[in-house]
Amino acid sequence: MTNMTLSKPLKEMESTDLPASIVCVGNAWFPATPGGLDRYVYELAYNLSKRRDVIELCGVGLPESAADFPVTLTNLADPDRSLWQRLRQTRTSYLDSRTRESHKRVDAINLHFALYSLPLMSLFPADVPTTFHFHGPWALESDKEGSSKLGVMVKRWIEQQVYQRCDRFIVLSKAFGQILHESYRVPWNKIHVIPGGVNTDWFQISCDRTQARTQLNWPQDRFILFTPRRLVHRMGLDNLLLALAEITEAVPEVWLAIAGKGPLRSQLEAQVERLGLANNVRFLGFLPEADLPMAYQAADLTVMPSQSLEGFGLVLLESLACGTPAICTPIGGMPEVLSGLSLDLITDTADTDSITQTLQRAIAGEISLPDRASCRSYAVANFSWPTIAQRVRDVLLMPVP
């Protein structure tokens, strides 16, 4: 009965330009738990709704409603429950939402997180297109961070169960398309590459660097590097600190601001002490969303020293939209973001020596860093959310083959 009341097949719609009804299944509530995936889902849902589409966003820990967010919110589970309780509650909550919304058609299903998608797969009708947004290999990322073999196996099984029931996939970069194809055997004809988007109204040039530093109480007379990263191994922060130690031998005034939380905080702080960088590094901890645009504008350069599994790098877009150039390692989809702006912003390899050399050249002025206006215009022209959301919508509403 649930399947019958869920939707009207897309092929019966007169035009995909008509307002569509789309169900998005994400993870957590972005304003409360900031993260790349959650931010993406939040922004996508908001921008689709601005097109007059009817969007239902499902996730864990969602409020009943949110001011200035014209999207129907369905809380699938209490995030404080055990895993098995959450999975059971997810299915029940979604069925309840279908009962309440039984008079509404659904034209497309858009999944973003395999764990909470799995209990719902049997509830989706075959005639409604189901698209999975592949934000990264969940099991492989867990393996890189030292999760148990059993945990990695279970996550891999969940991914496979969900992926085999999807009609198509969206990836944010060719690099992650390759992983999806090679590691999960998804054929290329089901994979659509659409880059991530950036909220250019929020991330913008609002003041000059001096004003930004004053507001954040950052030093005015130093070359400042900024990196907002989760403090885990694959982000490469230990390599960045090693690079900074070598750079400060010639340029002792260089200063690095690290924003983010994670299990490596104490280990990285100890590394700073060992390297004699106490006067060159500040750990900001969790940086509130309201402070992020100011932090980007206060920095001379944003650095992304990732070592593996960086599917896209939304940080790069945020920095550019705020007028600050960014340097990245040639990992995952990051080079796809910066190559159209300047190849000099991409290190040759991901190792410490290459990071060191590129930063040294940038600080010394041997690399022509794009100015604020060029960074901003590049981000707006290529990655603004209205443009990206339309491209995503076109894929979501493609009929089932």
Image (cartoon, grey):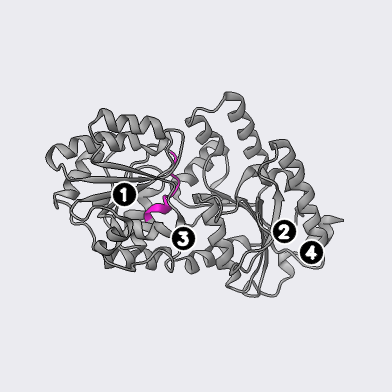
Q: Which residue is mark 4?
A: 101
**Which secondary structure lies at badge 1?**
strand
Give the residue type at disc 2: Val
Crowding around mark 3 (Cα neighbors within 10 Å: few <14, some 14 to 19, many 20+) is many
Q: Is residue 181 left or right of residue 114?
A: left
Name which residue lies at 44% across and 45% down: 175
Give the residue type at disc 1: Phe
Name which residue lies at 69% across and 37% down: 83
Q: Nearer the viewer, mark 2 or mark 3?
A: 3
Q: Nearer the viewer, mark 4 or mark 1?
A: 1
**Which secondary structure lies at badge 4?**
loop
In which image quadrant can residue 318 be found? bottom left
**Which secondary structure lies at badge 2?**
loop
- Residue 122 in view: no
Q: Is residue 161 left or right of residue 171?
A: right
Closer-to-camera residue (3/319) = 319
Coordinates of residue 130 in the picture (x, y in percent): 67, 54
Q: Which residues are magenta?
A: 309-316
- Magenta highlight on residue 84: no
Q: CA distance from mark 4 to mark 1?
A: 46 Å
Residue found at the far right of this picture: 1
Q: Which residue is mark 1?
A: 226
Q: Which residue is mark 2?
A: 128
Name which residue lies at 38% across and 49% down: 334
